[in-house]
């Protein structure tokens, strides 16, 4: 956890209760999850009740209350990907990694999430590993795609 | 960069920019829309830069990464200017040849240009490809010409001249009247007249008013707003400033997605550049009008695209809708009048002010004017964004622009408007694209997303899928929506597993009626729409699942297993 980066974000928005969601988004992007002590800090710095921070953190899908793996796998299950076989892609990823959506494996190598439509329906079914998009992927190709990560 | 203080200074700046442009200088414009990014254009961009470096041509050839060109299925798309030669499905290996043959020797590479799948006819220029030629690209046409990260590019194509006209030659009421006469209808789903909405906010009794760009675009299969906003952010911003002037608002908000990094970058940059030039901030263009804009993000829930929920989110609270006994245009953010329109609606505004309401009224049908962006997805050869005049037949959109249904399958149904939209059968495909016609058929246009489903698609399963999606996106505040969706989902899930019971359809209809009447917000009140339209046109398919334990599309796995016994 990079405390300086988190403090920088908090200092930028100190006392601005209206920026709560933005602050949490920036910290999530920096740290990939929201530890309890960080949420306490957010509550203090922005002067909002801790309960509100927790409420926002559990309301939105983007926020994670547990540490993520080194690589984040996102599988689009938007309508177009769904009717093009996203469930089979999800099944293959689950079989290969042994984790379900929302989970991280024991080695903290992969975290798996399902995401809503990413807006590039021509690429479906698709999955994203970190920033890399794997377009028009078939379940058979997934083992190869996952091998590149450690 | 100095702030522009008058229309004359804006023109002077524009002429200065134009005089520096050499129309004969070759440039390579590479699409960086979401689909092309997903299809690997990043490697392509580096390959072009590297190759130009190797041949010491960096100074002589410009490389521009643009927004979405459309025709996403054939991405990554590269256009070589000034000849406007359009290459499709370009790979990094093709780069040296494109530079030596096309950029330098001005020759067309045959294998990279468009070939019509039916006639075999070739088209080298963007304007000759039927996909582009037959569209009416009022909003999207400039996407391949400008760098979204450069305000100068937008100024060079006449950008912000509509703003200058509105601020300096028209009164706010004149601007409002022009938009009303143009009969611009909101592109976000409801099709409500934008001018009337503006007027409500303008006349609402509070000095402080807000204007908002809804760029949430949460409907799965809708990606036209992202394509437009990412490719040409200034066109939306210009519309917003004009609208703010008409309404009397000095504070705007952009509410967009956090998960599209290119869009975020382009919007942030557009705001910073507009401010530097004095197109935002105090005394815009010397008119005395002040306006500033803040960006807020959705961080992952569908309901936050609903207007009152979105406004809660801008306040920094959980995005739960509130009852609209008083409309948000009167009582919105911090209980102040707040006018919300979506990306495409705002982008139409500079066009209407620039070219006049008469021009705008000449496009479209009797009650649906202008062009409409449509995103095509699902079982269609071209998953893409097209822009067509309202009134275009659905058949033309599916077959001429969408290229028809892949793998020789037959089209079964078209679904409009995502999880709160509606489905129509193939037999109604000769209807026009029109807000009211589609509403009457039971499938509101929504934001303009069309999902094609082929004969192998089970509509019971699709209805189940939409409710499954919504069950995770409902905010949970009101009981009819939270519990109703769950019960409907259970019934449909049972049907797809061969556990459907007599009376299920009637029960679904009853639940639909209650949710439609009793839910708090427009999300809750519309969740039953896909199901009701499917029951209207495909009731027999639902009955087969219950009575015969049979899936006519051979899609539901559990039922196929039962059939095998």
Image (tube, coloured by chain):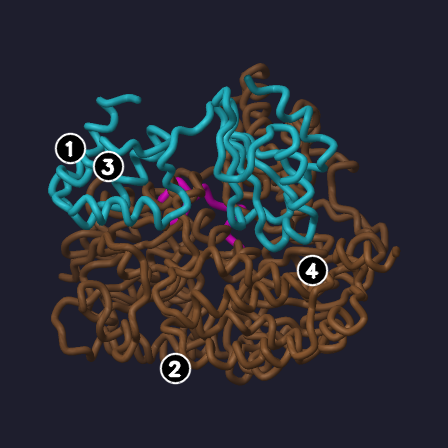
At mark 2, the secondary structure is helix
At mark 3, the secondary structure is helix
Sequence-wise, which precedes: disc 4 or disc 2? 2
Sequence-wise, which precedes: disc 3 or disc 1? 1
Q: Which mark is nearer the camera, 2 or 1?
A: 1
Given residues B442 and B146, the one toward you in this image is: B442
Q: Name the residue under label 1.
A: A11
B524 lies left or right of B449: left
Q: Distance between the Cα atoms at labels 2 and 3?
A: 51 Å
Q: Mark 4 points at which residue?
A: B401
Residue at the spot 70% in from the left edge and 64% down from the top edge: B499
Given residues B475 and A3, the one toward you in this image is: B475
At mark 1, the secondary structure is helix
Q: Which mark is nearer the camera, 4 or 3?
A: 3
B359 lies left or right of B79: left
Q: Are marks 4 and 2 on the same chain?
A: yes
């Amino acid at each position: 956890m990079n405390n300086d980066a988190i403090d920088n974000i908090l200092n930028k928005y100190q006392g601005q209760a209206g920026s709560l969601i933005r602050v949490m988004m920036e910290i999530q992007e920096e740290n990939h999850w929201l530890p309890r002590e960080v949420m306490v800090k957010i509550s203090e710095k922005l002067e909002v009740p801790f309960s509100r921070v927790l409420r926002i953190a559990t309301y939105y899908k983007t926020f994670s209350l547990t540490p993520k793996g080194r690589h984040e796998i996102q599988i689009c299950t938007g309508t177009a990907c769904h009717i093009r076989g996203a469930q089979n892609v999800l099944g293959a990823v689950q079989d290969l990694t042994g984790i379900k959506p929302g989970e991280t494996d024991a080695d903290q190598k992969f975290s798996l999430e399902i995401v809503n439509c990413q807006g590039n329906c021509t690429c479906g079914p698709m999955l994203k590993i970190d920033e890399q998009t794997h377009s028009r992927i078939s379940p058979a190709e997934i083992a190869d795609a996952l091998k590149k990560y450690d | 960069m100095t702030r522009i203080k008058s229309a004359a200074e804006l023109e002077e700046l524009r002429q200065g920019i134009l005089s520096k442009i050499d129309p004969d200088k070759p440039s390579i414009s590479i699409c960086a829309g979401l689909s092309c990014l997903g299809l690997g254009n990043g490697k392509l961009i580096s390959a072009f830069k590297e190759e130009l470096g190797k041949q010491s041509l960096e100074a002589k050839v410009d490389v521009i990464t643009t927004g979405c060109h459309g025709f996403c299925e054939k991405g990554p798309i590269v256009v070589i200017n000034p000849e406007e030669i359009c290459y499709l499905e370009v790979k990094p290996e093709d780069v040296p040849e494109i530079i030596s043959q096309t950029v330098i020797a001005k020759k067309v590479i045959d294998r990279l240009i468009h070939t019509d799948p039916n006639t075999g006819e070739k088209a080298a220029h963007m304007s000759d490809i039927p996909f582009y030629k037959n569209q009416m690209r009022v909003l999207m046409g400039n996407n391949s010409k400008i760098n979204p990260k450069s305000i100068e590019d937008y100024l060079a194509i006449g950008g912000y001249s509509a703003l200058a006209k509105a601020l300096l030659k028209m009164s706010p009421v004149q601007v409002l009247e022009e938009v009303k006469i143009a009969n611009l209808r909101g592109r976000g789903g409801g099709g409500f007249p934008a001018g009337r909405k503006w007027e409500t906010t303008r006349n609402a009794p509070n000095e402080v008013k807000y204007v908002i760009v809804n760029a949430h675009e949460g409907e799965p299969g809708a990606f036209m707003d992202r394509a437009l906003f990412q490719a040409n952010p200034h066109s939306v911003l210009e519309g917003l400033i004009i609208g703010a002037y008409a309404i009397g608002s000095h504070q705007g908000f952009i509410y967009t997605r956090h998960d599209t990094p290119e869009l975020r970058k382009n919007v942030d940059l557009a705001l910073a550049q507009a401010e530097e030039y004095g197109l935002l901030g105090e005394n815009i263009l010397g008119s005395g009008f002040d306006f500033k804009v803040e960006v807020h993000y959705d961080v992952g829930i569908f309901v936050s695209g609903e207007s009152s929920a979105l406004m809660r989110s801008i306040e920094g609270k959980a995005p739960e809708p509130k009852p609209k006994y008083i409309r948000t245009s009167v009582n919105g953010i911090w209980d102040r009048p707040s006018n919300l329109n979506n990306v495409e609606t705002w982008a139409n505004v500079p066009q209407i002010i620039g070219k006049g309401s008469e021009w705008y009224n000449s496009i479209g049908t009797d009650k649906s004017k202008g062009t409409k962006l449509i995103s095509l997805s699902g079982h269609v050869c071209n998953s893409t964004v097209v822009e067509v005049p309202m009134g275009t037949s659905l058949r033309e959109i599916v077959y001429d622009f969408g290229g028809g249904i892949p793998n020789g399958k037959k089209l079964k149904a078209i679904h409009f408007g995502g999880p709160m939209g509606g489905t129509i059968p193939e037999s109604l495909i000769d209807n026009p694209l029109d807000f009211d016609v589609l509403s009457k058929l039971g499938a509101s246009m929504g934001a303009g997303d069309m999902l094609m489903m082929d004969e192998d698609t089970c509509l019971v399963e699709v209805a189940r899928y939409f409710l499954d999606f919504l069950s995770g996106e409902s905010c949970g505040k009101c009981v009819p929506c939270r519990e109703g969706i769950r019960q409907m989902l259970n019934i449909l899930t049972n049907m797809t597993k061969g556990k459907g019971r007599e009376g299920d359809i009637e029960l679904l209809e009853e639940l639909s009626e209650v949710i439609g009447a009793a839910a708090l917000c427009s999300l809750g009140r519309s969740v039953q729409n896909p199901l009701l339209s499917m029951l209207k046109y495909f009731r027999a398919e639902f009955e087969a699942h219950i009575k015969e334990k049979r899936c006519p599309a051979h899609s539901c796995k559990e039922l196929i297993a039962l059939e095998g016994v």
